[in-house]
Amino acid sequence: MDINRLRQALAFIERETHLRTKSYRMLSDGVQGAFLQAFSLMVRPMAVLEIGTFTGYATLCLARGLQEGGRVDTIEKDDEMTDIFTRAFAIAGAEDSIRPMQADAMQAIPGLPGPYDIVYIDADKRLYGKFYDLVFPKVRPGGYILADNVLWSGKTALEAPPHDRQTSAIMDFNSTVAADPRTEQLVIPVRDGLAVIHKKRD
């Protein structure tokens, strides 16, 4: 992927997201985007699965390190921002290596072939545990699951965290992953917390 075209596409996404949506806080920032690019370049994935496309910023960052002939499958339930990420993928010259799917991830994931080298979870926080269970068999041994927002504005680190559904679901997810003997994991305090989960075995 040409880095200059990628930068143009990411700048386009940032501008359009701020202009057209009130949910611009959901957009990955430059630091997190740089981390995702570096991670993808290190892993050199053949197949990536992203749960939660939004406007495609993280999608393109993850696509940067793809091997020749590799692909990113990205799932987004809401079709409101499709035109933003479709145009951005074209600006980056990555449209042939990214397969967007408008679908409910809970329904779409079981039908995906895998195996994936990287899975990136950044969708409904209440479903993180279910996403994890669904994608785990589709990640190759030695592959990675990345999960965004696991610090949840610091709420998951409080001695007395709030009991809303999203915070509780993320805390349950964090506990499940930490106790999973099939993995090694680390939470990186980038932006809102990024879990890096290494799958050792099935």
Image (cartoon, rainbow, N blue to C red):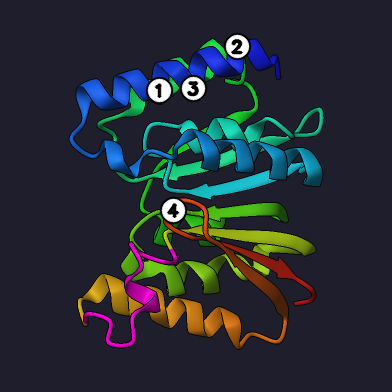
Q: Position of residue 122 (x, y in %)?
A: 44, 53
| Residue lying farthest to the front in this orientation | 159
15 left or right of 52?
Answer: left
Taking the spot 81% from the left edge, 28% from the top edge, the residue there is 68
For the residues labelled 4 and 1, the Cα–Cα distance comes to 17 Å
141 left or right of 165?
Answer: right
Residue 58 belongs to magenta span: no
| Mark 3, other Cα within 10 Å: few <14 / some 14–19 / many ≥20 | many
Q: Position of residue 190 (x, y in %)?
A: 52, 53
Which of marks 3 and 4 precedes in the sequence?
3
Q: Which mark is residue 122?
A: 4
Q: Which mark is residue 5?
A: 2
Q: Which residue is mark 1?
A: 13
> Magenta part of the protein: which range?
150-162
Q: Is residue 11 above or below residue 179?
A: above
Which of marks 1 and 4 precedes in the sequence?
1
Q: Which residue is mark 3?
A: 10
Q: Secondary structure at mark 3?
A: helix
For the residues labelled 3 and 2, the Cα–Cα distance comes to 9 Å
The answer to whether mark 3 and mark 2 are in CB contact below 8 A is no
Amino acid type indicated by mark 1: Ile
Taking the spot 70% from the left edge, 87% from the top edge, the residue there is 181
Q: Position of residue 192 (x, y in %)?
A: 42, 56
For the residues labelled 3 and 1, the Cα–Cα distance comes to 5 Å
Amino acid type indicated by mark 2: Arg
- Residue 193 in view (yes/no): yes
Amino acid type indicated by mark 4: Asp
Residue 155 belongs to magenta span: yes
Which of marks 1 and 2 precedes in the sequence?
2
Q: Is residue 88 above or below residue 196?
A: above
| Mark 2, other Cα within 10 Å: few <14 / some 14–19 / many ≥20 | some
